[in-house]
């Protein structure tokens, strides 16, 4: 798309689709006049008049060949939120459809935030008089971030109401990304990362390649500026050589096709910085190793010509066997169609080739927006309806998830992920997100089969329930006659359930159980996890309030039913304890320095620092520093007996320390009790290795006296990043066969 159009109403009117009537153009000009008057005096961060943003959004929508009502809504999209104009005003002047579209976009930014995660970060959730100015600033920052996430949630939900609302929001985000350079660096990074994670993925899911690639490149510029600059400079240096090569290739391909009577429009494919970076990362290659990957696109009249052109290409140049994909016979889940192949060109280097019809090309560039681009006047567009139906089916769980964080995680796993197509024994196709397990498959087939799932066979072989399914596999679910799901299925650390659809049905099952049973189970879940992590007393009432529950009973019931993720609770405890003021007063000065351990130290400039072996503090533990004689500062847990026993005189040697934000790893001792068996230590070692955890010490004792079975006692020291990381590792170890107990070993 053009990102440097003149920002004027004249340019917009000149570049409207030819199908627009004089009445349409008059309405658009009138909408501009209304928006200009409403936004009079308002400025952008660039100091330009605010109306320039409205025109830019309308320009993007015009390029997508959207309907007149959508372009008018683009011009007016901020008026109800930022000016005195009302929806009634818009309805009276431009009709109910325009008012409904503007209302849809306005709701994305201004509806009250109802999720628990949002309410707990609102400025009035805590008495700000009790907070320091720094804490108030941090709190407001968290609140703004949360509201931004809620806007994303509402944007995605709007797909089910009217996808045009989402297209207006994408156009709004695209122009904001084009002008992001005028905002503060911290805001730039946050918005850019958000754009990569959500908005570019959303454009991809809707099949709008033109918007997707530009959002990716613009966002990458701020997320990783060094790498962006490096690739951009290297592309610029080689541009003339590359263009000359592509020109020669296009001529030879055109000649080969015309010699056999195939009409084709052949053109070089543009190189996008973010896609080059992704290719470098995925293949572990440098720019010099991927720079020679050239690509051309062939646009031919019809589908038979696509396959005929493929044959000619393969006859002239040797095809690379693993590089062929037929997305015409088997379209992607966003309805993308094209033939992809790669051949070794005359210079011995790869040449990527895409072959498609004009309609396929428009669909690939404009995705769901092509419905309006070329179907104007058509009473029914079957492909468009299929796309909308597919999106709604992917999100049939959306009403069950109120928490913003979890909703966005679910969208990224259930909607934005690549798809896996597995088969039932009868040959029915089950469409699942990449990474799905047999439990996800079972719930997709039928809720009752999911509840009673106890095992699975894949292609005739028994597999564990955490097995990751692959396309083309036939899955048989083994069920019990009665019973329900296990609460372990909701433990994300174990990887038993991938999809939000399955999670929603599991939660619904637990919600129907007896409240007293859920209360007891929830309390046990939390206490078991705290005990496993070696955490001291946690104020459970305060923790419940933090998640916006009136009392601990409701909190425990919600935990038992899966409404709160245990990982979220551990993460919250981690954040709270990392920022908790020391319970012992210190005489430390206010200057803060950073140590090599990722610990922020108040005062004691230049002193060495070490973690105390008596209590083995780990990130997330409340800590205190003790200035030793000749060995620098030793960092202890605040509940370490050695700290609690020190005399009043010795308290003067305490200094305030807090966990920093460096990506350091910390040694944490754990103890494991298990029935001894061959390969036990190997299984534990493989698991920790797969999780990127290093075992720095190991000691195994086999006790043959405790019972008829041999009991192995394993003392290990793991290097972890945080309490959350430790919780994941311990949870996964506990799920291994023959493990009786695993917990953090507290010193002191």
Image (cartoon, rainbow, N blue to C red):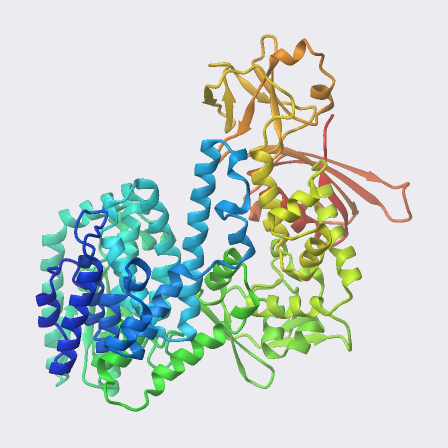
Quick one: quadrant of the C terminus?
A: top right
Instruction: Describe residue 660's horizontal placement relative to residue 512 as left or right.
Output: left
Frontmost residue, 313 versus 353: 353
Frontmost residue, 553 versus 196: 553
Tally the marks: 0
Q: Is residue 443 above or below residue 745?
A: below
Frontmost residue, 15 versus 135: 135
Q: Is residue 250 visible?
A: yes
Residue 198 pos. (x, y %): 39, 59
Quick one: quadrant of the N terminus?
A: bottom left
Instruction: Describe residue 117's horizontal placement relative to residue 101 as left or right.
Output: right
Instruction: Describe residue 647's horizontal placement relative to residue 109 as left or right.
Output: right
Instruction: Describe residue 94's horizontal placement relative to residue 330 as left or right.
Output: left
Q: Is residue 17 above or below residue 270?
A: below
Residue 83 pos. (x, y %): 28, 59
Residue 570 pos. (x, y %): 62, 45
Q: Residue furthest bottom?
A: 379
Q: Is residue 726 above or below residue 305?
A: above
Dividing the picture into quarters, in which one does residue 458 lie?
bottom right
Dividing the picture into quarters, in which one does residue 310 lie?
bottom left
Q: Is residue 316 visible?
A: no
Q: Is residue 487 above or below residue 597?
A: below
Residue at the location (17% across, 64% down)?
Answer: 346
Residue 653 pos. (x, y %): 61, 12
């Amino acid at each position: 798309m053009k990102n440097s159009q003149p920002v004027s109403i004249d340019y917009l009117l000149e570049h409207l689709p030819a199908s627009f009537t004089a009445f349409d153009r008059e309405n658009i000009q009138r909408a501009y006049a209304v928006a200009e008057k409403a936004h009079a005096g308002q400025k952008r961060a660039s100091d330009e008049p605010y109306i320039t943003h409205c025109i830019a959004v309308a320009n993007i929508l015009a390029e997508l060949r959207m309907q007149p009502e959508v372009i008018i809504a683009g011009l007016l999209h901020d008026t109800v939120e930022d000016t005195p104009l009302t929806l009634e005003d818009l309805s009276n002047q431009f009709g109910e459809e325009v008012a409904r579209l503007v209302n849809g976009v306005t709701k994305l930014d201004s509806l009250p935030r109802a999720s628990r995660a949002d309410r707990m970060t609102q400025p009035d959730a805590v008495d700000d008089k009790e907070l320091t100015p720094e804490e108030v600033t941090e709190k407001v920052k968290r609140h703004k971030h949360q509201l931004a996430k809620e806007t994303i949630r509402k944007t995605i939900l709007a797909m089910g109401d009217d996808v045009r609302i989402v297209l207006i929001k994408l156009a709004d985000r695209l122009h904001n990304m084009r002008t992001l350079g005028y905002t503060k660096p911290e805001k730039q990074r946050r918005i850019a990362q958000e754009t990569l994670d959500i908005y570019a993925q959303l454009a991809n899911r809707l099949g709008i390649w033109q918007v997707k690639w530009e959002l990716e490149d613009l966002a990458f510029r701020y997320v990783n500026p060094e790498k962006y600059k490096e690739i951009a400079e290297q592309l610029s240096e080689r541009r003339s050589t590359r263009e000359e090569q592509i020109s020669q290739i296009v001529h030879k391909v055109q000649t080969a096709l015309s010699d056999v009577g195939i009409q084709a429009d052949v053109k070089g494919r543009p190189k996008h910085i973010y896609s080059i970076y992704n290719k470098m990362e995925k293949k572990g290659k440098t720019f010099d190793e991927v720079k020679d990957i050239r690509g051309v696109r062939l646009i031919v009249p019809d589908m038979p010509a696509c396959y005929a052109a493929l044959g000619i290409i393969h006859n002239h140049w040797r095809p690379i066997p693993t590089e062929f994909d037929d997305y015409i016979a088997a379209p992607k889940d966003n309805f993308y169609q094209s033939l992809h192949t790669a051949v070794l060109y005359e210079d011995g280097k790869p040449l990527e080739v895409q072959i498609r019809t004009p309609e396929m090309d428009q669909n690939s560039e404009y995705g769901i927006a092509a419905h309006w681009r070329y179907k104007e006047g058509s009473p029914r567009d079957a492909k468009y309806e299929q796309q909308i139906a597919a999106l709604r089916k992917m999100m049939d769980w959306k009403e069950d998830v109120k928490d913003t964080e979890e909703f966005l995680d679910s969208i990224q796993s259930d909607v934005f992920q690549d798809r896996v197509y597995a088969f039932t024994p009868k040959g029915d196709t089950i469409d699942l997100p990449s990474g799905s397990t047999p439990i996800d498959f079972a719930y997709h087939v039928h809720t009752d089969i999911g509840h009673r799932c106890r095992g699975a066979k894949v292609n005739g072989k028994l597999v564990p329930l955490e097995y990751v399914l692959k396309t083309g596999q036939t899955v048989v679910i083994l069920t019990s006659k009665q019973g329900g799901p296990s609460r372990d299925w909701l433990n994300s650390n174990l990887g038993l359930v991938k999809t939000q659809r399955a999670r929603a049905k599991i939660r619904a099952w637990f919600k129907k159980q007896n409240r007293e049973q859920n209360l007891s189970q929830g309390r046990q879940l939390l206490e078991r996890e705290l005990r496993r992590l070696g955490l001291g007393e946690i104020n459970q009432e305060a923790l419940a309030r933090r998640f916006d529950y009136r009392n601990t009973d409701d909190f425990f019931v919600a935990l038992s039913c899966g409404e709160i993720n245990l990982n979220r609770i551990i993460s919250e405890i981690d954040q709270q304890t990392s920022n908790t003021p020391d319970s012992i007063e210190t005489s430390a000065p206010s200057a803060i320095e950073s140590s090599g351990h990722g610990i922020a130290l108040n005062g004691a400039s230049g002193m060495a620092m070490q973690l105390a072996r008596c209590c083995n503090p780990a990130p997330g533990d409340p800590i205190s520093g003790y200035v030793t004689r000749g060995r620098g500062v030793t960092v202890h847990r605040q509940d370490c007996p050695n700290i609690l026993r020190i005399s009043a005189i010795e308290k003067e040697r305490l200094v305030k320390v807090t966990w920093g934000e460096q990506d350091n790893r910390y040694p944490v001792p754990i103890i494991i009790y298990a029935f001894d068996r061959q390969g036990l230590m190997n299984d534990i070692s493989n698991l920790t290795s797969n999780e990127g955890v290093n075992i720095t010490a190991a000691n195994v004792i086999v006790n043959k006296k405790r019972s008829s079975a041999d009991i192995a006692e394993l003392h290990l020291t793991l290097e972890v990043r945080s309490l959350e990381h430790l919780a994941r590792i311990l949870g996964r170890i506990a799920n291994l066969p023959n493990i009786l107990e695993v917990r953090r070993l507290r010193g002191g």
